[in-house]
Image (cartoon, rainbow, N blue to C red):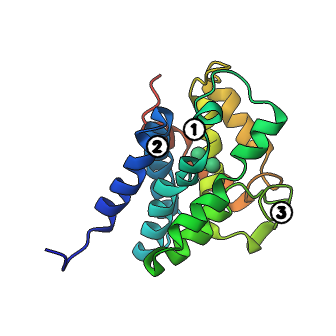
Amino acid sequence: MFGVVDFHEIIGCITGALEERDYYTEGHSQRVSDMVLFIAKRMGFPKDEVMLYHFSAHLHDIGKIGIPDAILRKNGRLTDAEFAVIKQHPEIGARILRKSPAFKEIAEIVLHHHERFDGQGYPDGIADYSIPLGSRLIAVCDSIDAMMTTRSYRKAFPENVCYEEIKQCSGTRYDPDIVDIVVANWKELMEVAGYSV
Ligand SMILES: [Fe+2]
Ligand SMILES: [Fe+2]
C-alpha cells in the first residue's frame, strides 16, 4: 500500500488543503502548472526536469495556507501592511516543503517564484540566472494567469494587453529566453491554460 507513491497524487492532497481555504488558488495553480509544463517542453528540457517544474508550479502558492483569512480572502485591494503579510507566502511554502527531502528542489523553486530577473523581486532579491529556472518559468506563467483572470478588485485584462505586458517586461521582470518561447507559442499557450475567447 505504501510502496509506490504517485507524486501527482500527493501534491493533489497538499494543494487540496489550501483550496479548502482559498477557492481562487485551485484553478490558478492548475493553469500555471499546465502553462509551465507546456513551455518547459517547448524549451526542450529532459522529462525529469519538465516534471520538476510542473510539480513546483502546482505548489507555488502553497504558503498562502499560512496567511490569515482576513487577508487571504479579502475582497478588494490590500493595504501595504496586508501586502507585506502576503509576501511571506514563498517562505512559508518553502518551509512546508522542506519537511520532506523529496521536495527539496521544489522548495527552492517555490521560495523564489516572486524574484524578478532584474533582482527587484522577493524574498531575496536575487537576479538572472541565480534564480532557479523553475522559479523563472513560474514567474511568467503566474503573471499571465493573474492578468487573464478577474480579481475581486479588477476585471481580467484583454489578451493583447497581457501579451504586450509580458513582452515589455522581458529582461526586467522575466527571463528573456522564456519570454521568447512564450511569445512564439502564445496562441497555443492560451489554449493550454483554457482561457475562453
Ligand atoms: Fe505566489
Ligand atoms: Fe500564483
Q: Which residue is mark 1?
A: 145
Instruction: Kindly indicate the quadrant of the structure image that contains residue 115.
Output: bottom right
Q: Which residue is mark 3?
A: 125
Q: Residues within 10 Å of mark 2 (few under 14, many from 20)?
A: many
Q: Residue at x 47, y 30 (%)?
A: 195
The residues bearing labels 2 and 3 have C-alpha atoms spaced at a distance of 26 Å
Q: Is residue 125 left or right of residue 152?
A: right
Asked if residue 55 is positioned above or below residue 85 in the image, the reply reads below
Is mark 1 in CB contact (under 8 Å) with mark 3? no
Q: Residue at x 42, y 51 (%)?
A: 15
**In this view of the protein, which residue sits in the foreground, 108 or 180?**
108
Measured from the top left, where is residue 30 in percent x and y?
Answer: 43, 45
Q: Which residue is mark 2?
A: 31
Q: Secondary structure at mark 2?
A: helix
Q: Residue at x 75, y 30 (%)?
A: 78
Question: Which one is earlier in the sequence, the residue at label 1 or at label 3?
Answer: 3
Measured from the top left, where is residue 118 in percent x and y?
Answer: 85, 59
Is mark 2 in CB contact (under 8 Å) with mark 1? yes
Q: Secondary structure at mark 1?
A: helix
| Residue 193 in sight in this render | no
Question: Which one is earlier in the sequence, the residue at label 2 or at label 3?
Answer: 2
Quadrant the N terminus occupies = bottom left
Disc nearest the viewer among 1 and 3: 3
Instruction: Kindly indicate the quadrant of the structure image that contains residue 82.
Output: top right
User: Label 2 is placed on what type of residue?
Assistant: Arg
